[in-house]
Amino acid sequence: MELTVEVEKYLASRKVGIKAIQKVLKGMQSNFNYKNIEELAIISMLKETWLGKLESNIQDLEEVLECLSRRLLKTRVSLLNILNQ
């Protein structure tokens, strides 16, 4: 049960973290005076690439956590079945 609670906390904090990162990146874009369009394009490209990689890594982690959670649940059920025999 503790793992489930921790996973739920992680998923909630992940959403908050992504929103905070997006807000900071938007603020960076509006606070700087760019000398040319190329700088703005580079910043936008880096932002998209970085956020894409971050989201991909988070999705991978979520998949691993889901798999681990299911495996732990199956193990628990098996142990309970053994104890009840």
Image (cartoon, rainbow, N blue to C red):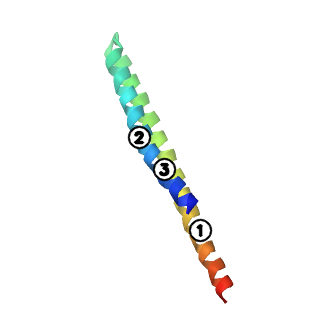
Q: Position of residue 39 (x, y in %)?
A: 38, 17
Q: Secondary structure at mark 1?
A: helix
Distance from label 1 to label 2 (Cα)? 28 Å
- The kind of residue on which mark 1 rests is Arg
Q: Quadrant of the N terminus?
A: bottom right
Residues tagged 1 and 3 counted as in contact (Cβ below 8 A): no
- The kind of residue on which mark 3 rests is Lys
Distance from label 2 to label 3 (Cα)? 11 Å
- CA neighbours of label 1 inside 10 A, class few (<14), some (14 to 19), many (20+): few
Q: Is residue 54 left or right of residue 33?
A: right
Residue beneath disc 2: 16
Tag shown at residue 9? 3
- The residue under the point 51% across, 45% down is 57
Q: Is residue 74 visible?
A: yes
Q: Nearer the viewer, residue 64 or 5?
A: 5
Q: Secondary structure at mark 2?
A: helix
Residues tagged 2 and 3 counted as in contact (Cβ below 8 A): no
Residue beneath disc 1: 71
Q: Nearer the viewer, residue 24 or 12?
A: 12
- The kind of residue on which mark 2 rests is Val
First in sequence, mark 1 or 3: give its number. Answer: 3
First in sequence, mark 2 or 3: give its number. Answer: 3
From the image, state whether disc 1 or disc 2 is nearer to you.
2
Q: Position of residue 75 (x, y in %)?
A: 63, 73
